[in-house]
Image (tube, rainbow, N blue to C red):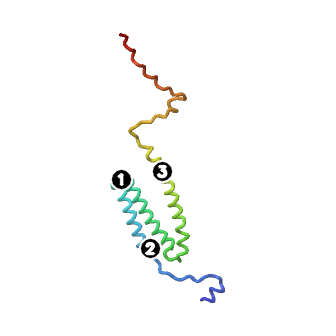
């Protein structure tokens, strides 16, 4: 076999045990059911989004490990697969301050702030209050 592989120029790959795809499918189905449950119960928005993202990451890892066969590959391939994940996480966290600032502007605030430019090109200041006339004795 080794002489045949050397002649043909192809590497001989080690045989690995096939994963139990039915079990992975059941795990993914259970995680999807949990996601639907998290969406249906009345959690605060921040907790709901956080849990849904964590469950989506868990499902993505399962798909990458078993359906993309990363669990059976050598560790060097993990570096190639994890690099975009780290880059995406960094970019999302980098945008987080801007996104949270924009989120707060959608809510009604107790103190109304008016923009003078929206009131007209040359907003007029209110007239100064006049002092009452002095009493002449």
Q: In which quarter of the image is the C terminus?
A: top left
Return the disc, 3 or 2, that comes first in the chain's sequence.
2
- Work out whether 136 lies above or below 50: above
From the viewer's perspective, is the residue at label 3 or at label 1 nearer? 3
Of callouts 2 and 1, which one flags the residue occurring earlier in the amino acid sequence? 2
How far apart, in angstroms, are the residues tagged by discs 3 and 2? 39 Å
Q: Residue furthest front?
A: 137
- The residue under the point 58% across, 83% down is 12
Q: In this view, does 106 lie above or below 120?
A: below
Neighbour class for label 1 at 10 Å: few (<14), some, many (≥20)?
Answer: few
Real-space Cα separation, disc 3 to disc 1, in angstroms: 18 Å
Image depth: mark 2 or mark 1 in front: 1
Dot placed on the residue nearer the N-terminal end, 3 or 1 = 1
Q: What element carries label 1?
A: loop
Of 119 and 35, which appears nearest the observer?
119
Q: Give the numbered dot on residue 21.
A: 2
Which label was assigned to residue 95?
A: none
Question: In terms of image quadrants, where is residue 106?
Answer: top left
Residue at mark 1: 44
Q: Between residue 19 and residue 137, name the one nearer to us.
A: 137
- Please say if 68 is above or below 43: below
- Residue 99 is labelled as 3
Residue at image coords 63%, 89%: 3
Query: Residue 17: horizontal and vertical position, in percent?
Result: 47, 81
Relative placement, left or right, of 65 versus 3 is left
Q: In this view, does 105 lie to the left or right of 11?
A: left
Q: Residue at x 40, y 69 (%)?
A: 27
């Amino acid at each position: 076999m080794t002489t045949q592989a050397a002649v043909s120029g192809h590497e001989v790959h080690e045989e690995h045990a096939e994963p139990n795809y039915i079990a992975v499918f059941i795990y993914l189905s259970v995680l999807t059911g949990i996601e639907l449950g998290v969406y249906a119960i009345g959690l605060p928005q921040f907790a709901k989004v956080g849990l849904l993202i964590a469950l989506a990451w868990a499902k993505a890892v399962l798909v990458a490990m078993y359906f993309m066969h990363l669990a059976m590959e050598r560790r060097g391939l993990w570096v190639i697969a994890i690099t975009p994940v780290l880059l995406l996480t960094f970019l999302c966290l980098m945008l987080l301050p801007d996104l949270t600032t924009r989120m707060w502007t959608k809510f009604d605030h107790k103190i109304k702030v008016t923009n003078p430019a929206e009131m007209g090109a040359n907003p007029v200041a209110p007239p100064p209050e006049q002092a009452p006339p002095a009493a002449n004795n």
